[in-house]
Amino acid sequence: MRGLSRHEKAQLEEGLREDELREEVLRDAETFMEAWRNLEPEEQSRRLQGIISRAVHLGEAERLVLREALAREGVCGKRGFDRILKEAQQLRERELRKRKRPCALFPGLVDLVLDDKGGVAFLVVRDGDLQVTNSWPGEDGMTLRPPEREQIPL
């Protein structure tokens, strides 16, 4: 059996970090819901904002369960949850973009293509197979991303 490639290792490490964050969010939400009535209003608001903002690390089904539980307990309405979550998702996307460097030249890159959502993606050779991916580990440890569609002269 062969070892993991750098890209596979990077994806595995990212997945493990996401799992840890997911567990932390669920644990904090459970603790918050048990104690929220005894908290000062400012503390309620601060902790609720933090939990919903970190819900971006949850899967869709887990987010819906959290949303329903908060609404059922009278902690937060569904619209309020959705608004805070949307803001957090936009902020996370901006932060992820900052951590990824646009690039269109590295070993293993075949071409730039459109993915199934119409966004620019890398077509790479990995283990002898062609694959489409939206990120690639750079030599300097920074994650590479394809340039924006508007930045490609064609």
Image (cartoon, grey):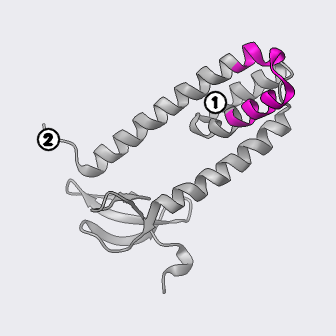
Q: As displayed, is residue 68 above or below residue 7?
A: above
Q: Mark 1 or mark 2, which has the lower sequence index?
A: 2
Q: Is residue 83 left or right of residue 103?
A: right
Q: Which residue is mark 2?
A: 2
Boundaries of the magenta span: 32-50
Q: As displayed, is residue 93 above or below residue 79?
A: below
Asked if the stretch drawn in magenta spans residue 96, the answer is no
Residue 132 picture location, percent across and down: 39, 59
Q: Is residue 24 left or right of residue 49?
A: left
In front of the other: 56 or 37? 37
Q: Amino acid at mark 2?
A: Arg
Which quadrant holds residue 82?
top right
In front of the other: 69 or 142? 142
Residue at the (65%, 53%) spot, across then down: 91
Asked if the stretch drawn in magenta spans residue 39, the answer is yes
Residue 129 picture location, percent across and down: 25, 56
Q: Amino acid at mark 1?
A: Ala
Chief SS of the magenta region: helix
**Local crowd size for mark 1, using a 10 Å CA cut-off: few (<14), some (14–19), many (≥20):** few
In front of the other: 36 or 147? 36
Q: Is residue 118 left or right of residue 88?
A: left
Q: Secondary structure at mark 2?
A: loop
Which image quarter holds the N terminus? top left
> CA separation, marks 1 and 2?
35 Å
Residue at the (44%, 59%) spot, across then down: 134
Residue 75 picture location, percent across and down: 83, 24
CB of mark 1 within 8 Å of CB of mark 2? no
Q: Which residue is mark 1?
A: 61
Residue 99 picture location, percent across and down: 47, 58
